[in-house]
Image (spheres, rainbow, N blue to C red):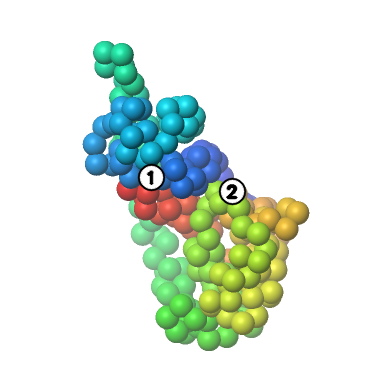
Amino acid sequence: MSQAPKDTSLHDRVALLKVIADETRLRILGLLSERDYSGKELAERLALTAPTISHHMRKLTAAGIVTSSAEAQRQVYSLNADLLRDVRKEPVAATEQAPLDAREKTLKNFFDGERLKSIPAQRKQRVIVLQKLLERFEPGRQYPEKEVNEILLTAHEDYATLRRELVDYGFMVRQNGIYEVAEELPPRSVQVGQEITGDEHQWLNEVIRSTISNVR
């Protein structure tokens, strides 16, 4: 079975998320979404030292999320609205509508609000449920196992099965007890490929893009 082509921009989007997955940098972006700020103004608004602001601004400008310009003897920072606008592009193709209908039907049948009525026995339905649960996790953020369990427990008491399946399908990666949303999906066998509804590469792309968009 041929594999869907890898989205070469997906890794860049995940790298961007890792940069902004920091409380201070999110606060900086919140201020810059209102207007441009100098480094000194940001330090005053956030009650931080100038070196701390400089450290965070180097991260943000290197990632392209923020641009800087020199005015007199100060650096003025602006939010790169073009970058954020670009990652919100690429609407889902019309050819994906039929799989999405099946997805919506499964979610309606198995979810009651935020709660999962039961874990589907049918594999196609289970994958759809797992994909929906993955949206409760932020790409680029690291989660200890205890926190993963707590998040999944809000959906269903059998959080251990859900956690294991998220890893087994490659939707999350685990290392030394720390979990993250996968940056890219693993190669699929023919059997597993038949359990996937629609274009899962497009789906993961949408999960990451929606998280970036929520920064604004």
Q: Check disc 2 and give the amino acid type.
A: Glu
56 sits to left or right of 35:
right
Is the N terminus in the top left, top right, bottom left or bottom right quadrant?
A: bottom right
**Residue at which label 1 appears:** 27
Category of crowding for the residue at label 2, using alpha-carbon neighbours closer than 10 angstroms: few (below 14), some (14–19), many (at least 20): many
Asked whether 40 or 128 is in front, the reply is 40
* Residue at the image point whose x is 46% and y is 68% from the top: 99
Residue 26 lies, in percent from the top left, at: 41, 45
43 sits to left or right of 128:
left
Considering only order in the chain, which callout, 2 or 1, is on the residue closer to the N terminus?
1
49 sits to left or right of 77:
right
**Circle number at residue 112:** none
Residue placed furthest toward the right: 176
Asked whether 53 or 205 is in front, the reply is 53
Category of crowding for the residue at label 1, using alpha-carbon neighbours closer than 10 angstroms: few (below 14), some (14–19), many (at least 20): some
Q: How many labels does the image show?
A: 2
Which secondary structure lies at badge 1? helix
Residue 125, visible in the rendered structure: no
**Residue at which label 2 appears:** 183
Asked whether 55 or 198 is in front, the reply is 55
* Residue at the image point whose x is 40% and y is 60% from the top: 95
Residue at mark 1 to residue at mark 2: CA–CA distance: 25 Å
Quadrant of residue 195 within the rendered picture: bottom right
Answer above or below: position of 69 versus 155.
above
Residue placed furthest toward the top: 72
Quadrant of residue 170 within the rendered picture: bottom right
